[in-house]
Image (cartoon, rainbow, N blue to C red):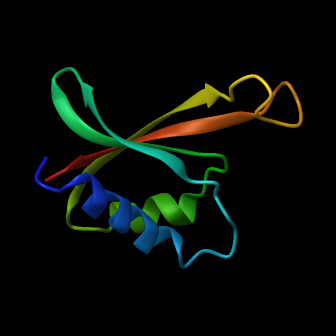
Amino acid sequence: MKLSKQECIDLVKKHSDNLQVNLMIKNFRIDNINDIEVFRFTMGIMSAEFLNSLRSDKKIKDIMYNPSFTPPGGSLDSISLRYKIYLLFN
């Protein structure tokens, strides 16, 4: 990965700032999947518009995601999910 953590955060914020809804994006970090460095963050609301906007960025090669339960006490009900988003850069 050629971008710093701050550059990755700025890139995500650039694509999320244009949305009308707060997607509850947080927990930014550099992570590894099978020894491939990726940038990971979580979001509370999945948005196709946001993912399509990220997908159109030439710096991003692939976007992966999976659902994740919120930590205890982190939501109003017991079935709430959040999503881990993984960005692989060119």
Which residue occupies 67% across, 64% down? Answer: 22
Looking at the image, residue 61 sits to the left or right of residue 44; the answer is left
Residue 73, image x, y percentages: 80, 28
Residue 13, image x, y percentages: 45, 68
Residue positioned most to the right: 77
Residue positioned most to the bottom: 18
Question: Which one is in front, 71 or 20?
Answer: 71
Q: Where on the picture, by quarter, is residue 4? A: bottom left
Which residue occupies 54% across, 79% down? Answer: 18
Q: How many marks?
A: 0
Which residue occupies 21% across, 67% down? Answer: 58
Looking at the image, residue 52 sits to the left or right of residue 49; the answer is left
Q: Is residue 53 above or below residue 68?
A: below
Residue 15, image x, y percentages: 44, 70
Looking at the image, residue 9 sits to the left or right of residue 38; the answer is right
Which residue occupies 88% across, 37% down? Answer: 76
Q: Is residue 2 above or below residue 21?
A: above
Residue 50, image x, y percentages: 51, 63
Q: Is residue 42 above or below residue 22?
A: above
